[in-house]
Each structure stands twice: as structure tokens, then as C-alpha cells.
Image (cartoon, coloured by chain):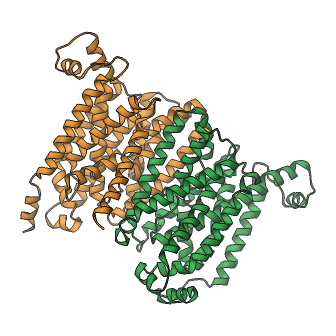
Chain colours: A green, B orange
Amino acid sequence: MTGETAEAGTAAAPSRTPRGRARTPVWVAGGLAALSAAVVLSLLVGANPLPVPALLDALAGGGGDEARFVVGEQRVPRTAAGLAVGAALGTAGALIQAFTRNPLADPGILGVNSGAAFAVAVGMAFFGVSDPSAYVWLACAGALVLTVVVYGVGAAGGPAAGPIRLTVTGVALGAVFAGLTTGLTLTRPDTFERMRGWSAGSLLERGFDVLLPVLPLLAAGLVLAAATAPALNAVALGPDVARAQGVHLGRVRVAVLAAVTLLAGGATAVAGPIAFVGLMVPHVVRWTVGPDQRRILLGTLIASPVLVLLSDVLGRVAVLPSEMPAGVVTAFVGAPVLIALVRRPKASGL
Amino acid sequence: MSAQVLRRRRVVRPRTAAVVLSGAVVTAVLGVLALGLGDYPLSPSQVVSVLAGLSDGFERIVVIEWRLPRALAAVVFGAALAVAGGVFQTLTRNPLASPDIVGLANGSFTGMLVALLVLGGGWPLLMSGSLVGGLAAAVVIYVLAYRGGIKGFRFIVVGIGVSAMLSSFNTWMLLRADVETALFASAWGAGTLNTVTAETAYPAAGAALALLAVLPFAAPALRQMDLGDDMARATGVRVDRARAAAIAVAVALVSTVTAVAGPIAFVALAAPQIARRLARAPGIPLAASGTVGAGLLLASDLIAQHVIPLTVPVGAVTVVFGGAYLVWLLVHEARRRP
């Protein structure tokens, strides 16, 4: 049933394989190659640069103590965190853009990040939470509450209300919670001190102890995302067409909201709020692979970690001897892409 | 025909006038309250007699020297931000186009942080840093969004992009500073009247009032531009010139306020929308936005000073209440229009 729906959705799209659009095996291979290169760079580059043989030795369990420490305790967990966070943020962005049919939708713009940040700040200020692995649950809970509220308020006007309303709601509620977080942290210097490290969005010192509890959540989110992808093709044609094709919109909505919460909340819990990955990557991927949501999701899943890892690598070497958090770098890479995007003659309107 | 229609539009609507008036009355009442509240409380009648020049001595010092600069700053700054927001929203015909979203605030904060952390300056340097930062951000956004004309949607998205860059740069600057400095800068960055004194409040309020006085000359053209550029051009408005002038005034208003009080969020976004809905006006009523904004900022500052037990920046309050009100309006609208 869903298979037929998806086929119909693709067929109804304006063109199947227009000029200049890469064939699936080609871009998947290209994306995986870029991803491998990013992983290797992330293992090699840093304040303690390692030559390739030393890296291989250390990975195999040999080499000097220092190299083993750098690779095993720092680079490998950090790279794993970058992979997971990138994949999760990108997929969350692609899902929410497809579902709201809003090219500007992004977990950050829709306020999900500030919900997560507020929950973490409350935990730090009132419950003395200081262990990053405990932020996870707070961040997810905050993300869930905000996603549901933003969607509830934003979609209350029915489909006619349009994406602007959802964006306004997201920006408004996001600002409210950011304001609450500011008020909370400014009155408590110790919370302020902890929050400012977290809120830049960084992969520094995110070990396996932080990452492992989140991985099941991220995996569940990715599975949900994959399951809803065919239905999203029908959603792209409008709610009426989707319904006519037999898509159960209520079920898709619950699945998308759950997936976005798991993915964005989990990723934010690990790395803090990293902006732009969810906004930018699905757009760039759409240029390459076309409008089919299944391909967009797959492409985003591959391309987002590349962006996060490269941003992280760049942040390690850009301002030696200190580090620039990955979240800052993604904003500096992402904003120009967003601007270029909206300056194109045929920029998609709201 | 259209000239007639437009002329009729310029007649002051009674409901809009009522909103302007009630906004002014509420602001005045709140003002008396603000001048009376504090460690040395005064009754409203005492405040009024001081203001009328009937009372001297300590009460006069308390009201005129201690409390008036801050209260006046709240009123004028609130009006200035709201009117600037109204101008932006009218020009882009989009409720999201507020200086907060459009990057001015973040640009000001960046300028201030550079002045504070890199150049290590005092208040004059911080204020000029914030001024330069805000203006530079505005120019960059305008240039990047310009493509044979300014389109609302493009303007906002470019603004969001530049804002995001600046705000993450700001986060990073704060991360490198020591805690004390970062706390001070963050309070300013949230928008606060705690640091306002007579020396900073009066010149800034004077400048803002002068800018507000210029705006009525541009307002008729603005109202026609609300109908769309072509329509406005057809009725004889020099669209590009009128727009550039209005943007310049709005940017100057926001920069003046921000230089003294930091980027106070959401007044510019929420006040025009609140005023428009209260007045049930077709476009954004600028005068009503002004009085609503003044009341909003003054009320928020009262809450920040006297209701919340700890000293929080007023920006944290405006964001919460302005945002919550906007959300409430969205819900309310959805209910009315099923």
C-alpha cells in the first residue's frame, strides 16, 4: 500500500530525472567517500596532529601511550559523537521540512533547541544536575514539550494557516524559552558558567559515556524516519492528495513528531544546540537528488555528519591554541549557504 | 479613484485613536507606579505632587534623580523599538521582520563584545561599538538581500542567517571571557535597564524622540507601500527613496536604544502586532504601536525590578511576556477562524 503511494507520489512530481541530477548509486558512493574522508580527517587533525602510521598503530592498540590516549580517549569518541549528532540533526531537519512543507523549518528555528536548553538549565539550576549523561533526558523532555506545543499552536488554524504561522509560533515560543533560560542563568553564576559551555554546541569532551545512552534514542528516531519517508512523498502533494492516496495523516504526524523529538533532543543532549545542520543539508541534498523524500532522507543521513565532522575539524585548528565549538563553525558555514539559497532567482518562498 | 480611496484611508480610525489613547493612559499610570515603587516607597499622590512641582526635598530627589531616568528610558525606548518594528513589518509586509530577528540586535551585541573584550573600553566605547555593530549588520543584510529590489521573504531569511552567524560568534566570544565579564556582557546582551543612568538615558531618549518626530513625514508613504510596491508607485510614491528613508530612521531608533540598554528583545516584534490586533486595523498603526510598546516595556521593567525577587534583565521579561502574548494571539485567532 505504502509502496504504491510512494510510486504515485514520485510519478506526480514535475519531472523524474531532470538534467544534471545524479543517479542514486553515484551520489551514494560519492557521499560515502566524503564521509570516510571526513572521519579520517577527524581522527588525524587536532592540537596533537598524528601522522597516518601512528594513527593506524594506535587504532590497532599499539603505538605510544600518548597517541593511544589521544586517539582512543579523544578522537574516536569525538568522531563517533560527530557522526551520530550530524545524522540525527540532518534527518530531523529533513523530516520537519517535508512534513510541514516549510523550507525554513529547522529544529532550531522551530524552537526545539531552546526547549531542550531550558530543560537543561532548569535541571542544572534547581536539581543540581551536572552530569552530561543526565542532560539527555532533560533535553529530550524539553524538546518533546516544545515540539508538541509549537505544532499544536501552529497547526491549530488548519492547513489553510500555512507554514508562516508555524514558523511564527516556533520563533515566538523559542524566544520565550530562550528568555526564561537567560533569566535563570543570569541569576545563578554557577549555572551560567556550565550553560555557556554547553550552549555553544561543541563535540569537545563528549565521550562514550555521554553518547551511549543517547544512541538507542537516535536509532529509534532514524527507524521512525525511514518508516515515514514513503508517506512524506504523498504529504508533499498536500493533505487532500495525501488522504486520497490512503495516507493516515494523524499517524504520520505522531511518527514525525516523535522522530524529530528523539533525533533533535538526543543530538542536542550530546552536543548542545548546533544550528543550521538541519536547515541547510536537506536543501543542498534536494538540489542533488531531486524531490523524492526517501532519497532526500538517505542523502541527508550521509551528508550531515560530513558537515558536522568537517566543522568540528575546522574548529580545532582555526584558532589554535584554543578551540572554536562546532556549533559556531556550522553557523559560519551554514549562514552563507542559506543566504546564497535565498538569493537564487527561483528561491522557494514561504 | 485610487487616490480617493487612499485619501479616505488616511482618516484616523476611531478604534485606532482609542488604542493610542488607552496605551498612553496605561503608560502614564504605570509611570506613576514606577516612580513610586522602590526601597523608599512613595504613594501615587506624592509622586504626582512631585511631578507637578509642589513638593521639594528628599521626595523630589528620589523621584526626579533616582527613578525618573529609568522610567523615562523605559517609556521612550519602548515606543522607539515598537515604532521601528512597525516600520520594518510594514515595509516587508511580514510580521516576522523585527530588528531582533533581522540581526540588528545581534550585530549590536557583537560590536559591544568586541569593544569590551578586544578593545577593553568603558561606556562610550561600548556604546559606539554597539552602534557601529548594529548599523554594519543592517547594511550587510540590506546589501545581501538586495537583488533588483528588496523582497520581504528574502530580507527575513538573510536576516536570520546573518543573525545566526553573529549570535554564534557572540556565544564564542563569551566563552572566551572570564565569568564576571561574561555575566556582565550577557546581562547587557539580554537587554537591561539596570545600568541606565541620567547621563545615558536623557541623551538617548532625546535622540529617539527626535527620530520619532521625523517619522510622521514618512508615514503616509509607508501606508501606501503596505499595499504593495506597484500600487504605491502608481499612486505617486517614490518607493525606493521612501523605503530607504524609513529603514534609516528605524535602524537609527533601534541602534540608539540598543547602545544604551542592550538589545531588548521582542518589543519591536510583539508591540506592533498587539497594536494592530487591538485596533483591528488593516495595516500596522504606528502611533498605537508606540504607546503599546511604551506600556509594554515599562510594565516589563516594573516586573523585572519589583515582582521577581532577583535582579533579572528586562529583556528576559519582555521576551517571555511578549512572546507568550503573541502565542496567545495566534491561538485565539485560530479559534475565531475555524
Where does residue B109 sit, x and y in percent of width and height?
A: 46, 41
Whether residue A4 can be seen here: yes
Q: In the rendered view, tell whether residue A103 sits above or below residue A63.
A: below
| Residue that protrudes farthest toward the top in the picture | B57
Where does residue B42 sit, x and y in percent of width and height?
A: 28, 19
B49 sits left or right of B75 in the view: left
Q: In the rendered view, tell whether residue B96 sits above or below residue B251.
A: below
A209 sits left or right of A28 in the view: right
Q: Nearer the viewer, residue B210 or A242?
A: A242
Q: In the rendered view, tell whether residue A300 sits above or below residue A200.
A: below
At x 66%, y 63%, the residue is A218
Q: In the rendered view, tell whether residue B200 sits above or below residue A100.
A: above
Where does residue A26 sit, x and y in percent of width and height?
A: 66, 82
Image quarter of the N terminus of chain B: bottom left
Q: Nearer the viewer, residue B13 or B165?
A: B13
Q: Nearer the viewer, residue B238 or B198?
A: B198
Q: Would you identify the image quadrant in which residue A333 lies?
A: bottom right
Number of marks? 0
A250 sits left or right of B286 in the view: right
Q: Nearer the viewer, residue A217 or A199?
A: A217
At x 50%, y 37%, the residue is B186
Image quarter of the C terminus of chain B: bottom left
Whether residue B247 can be seen here: no
Q: Would you identify the image quadrant in which residue A303 lies?
A: bottom right
At x 53%, y 80%, the residue is A231
Where does residue A72 sit, x and y in percent of width and height?
A: 83, 54
